[in-house]
Amino acid sequence: MKNPCYNTPMKNERSSSNSDTKDQPSYRSALKKAAMGMLSLLPMLLAILGLVGLFQVFVTPQMLAKLFSGDALRDTIVGTLAGAVAVGQALISYILGGELLKEGISLYAVAAFILAWVSLGIVQLPAEAEVLGLRFTIWRNLLALIFTPLTAAATVWTLRTFA
Amino acid sequence: MNAAPSEAPRIRWRGRKFLAGVLLLYFFLFLADQHATEAALFKTAKVIAEITPILLIVIFFTALINRLFRPEALAKHLGQESGLRGWLIALFAGILSHGPMYAWYPMIEDLKKHGLRDGLIVTFFYARSIKIPLLPLMIAYFGLGFTVLLSLYTVIASLLQGLILDRLCGRCDEDKEQNDD
């Protein structure tokens, strides 16, 4: 025979759990909704991908590398802006950054470049503004633009001071 | 906040003008330099092939979140009252996420409808600069000290930017709602 003192809380727990999930959509309907959401963004994603292709051909890593002059402060700003314009996998930024270091470009600039490569993106700005709002996009990119050279500077300064 | 369950889903295509502009750009570039434009198209096709699995993962992940968490629970974990837990979720989600930033827009937009705060989005996006699979390569190119410090300062910068944005951008949602209207 079941112990009523044991069964009561179990029953309560189950009913509480049911109330947590009863309003939830089935996984199938949630999947459909998510797929529809992605599908509605398809024109925008295709536009971004089209620009990515253009940038990869017309704005080559070699062209970006030529922008650096050797002056640490100027190159840090150039590195941030070049990283923001560049598109492609982060892996490419490491390889290119390594080559820039060999050519005598400051580590400050290289750090800013590889950080901006991932955190900033000119190509995706219209999509970001459409999806997340113009004001949010402006603030987010402005903050990233300010914090990227600062993060790069803090990294290299700490490395050189304590290493 | 959410559509009624009985409401039939309807696709509202977004970015059509943007796509038309890019297609027009391709057309003019094709007239100017056929070879380079074909190369760009090839690169685009290659990126589409690379990004498709990530987009599928994002769809499955978005559905899973919507299935497992009620809007109130999402708002509790990622909304205005989320506290330290919200910052940590945004930070680790950013570090662990793969693929380009724009692949995550649909999921972020969906979570935003459920109350995701703007500061956490900023933290998520900036924390994506830390790429765990690429850390060995970064160490090989720039050294262990550089990699550890850059990752550490990136975490700090991600959190600071999120906190600053929450202060600065209190009316960003209103701006977005106006855009939607």
Image (cartoon, rainbow, N blue to C red):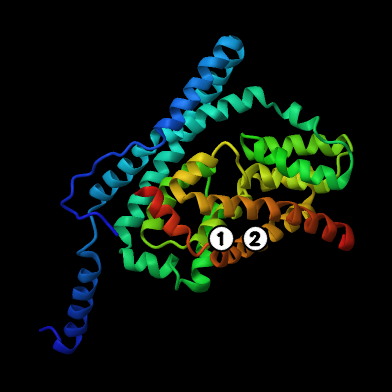
Q: Residues within 10 Å of mark 1 (few under 14, many from 20)?
A: many
- Report x, y in % for residue A96: 75, 34
Give the farthest residue toward the left.
A1
Residue position for label 1: B91
Mark 1 chain: B
- Report x, y in % for residue B24: 49, 20
The relative height of residue B49 versus residue B78 in the rendered view (above or below) is above
Q: Secondary structure at mark 2?
A: helix
Residue B62, numbered label? none
> CB under 8 Å between callouts 2 and 1?
yes
Q: Residues within 10 Å of mark 2 (few under 14, many from 20)?
A: many
- Residue drawn at x 88%, y 57% is A160
Q: Amino acid at mark 1?
A: Leu
Is B139 positioned to the left or the right of A86 in the image?
Answer: right
Residue position for label 2: B155
**Residue B124 in view, yes or no:** yes
Is A37 positioned to the left or the right of B174 in the image?
Answer: left
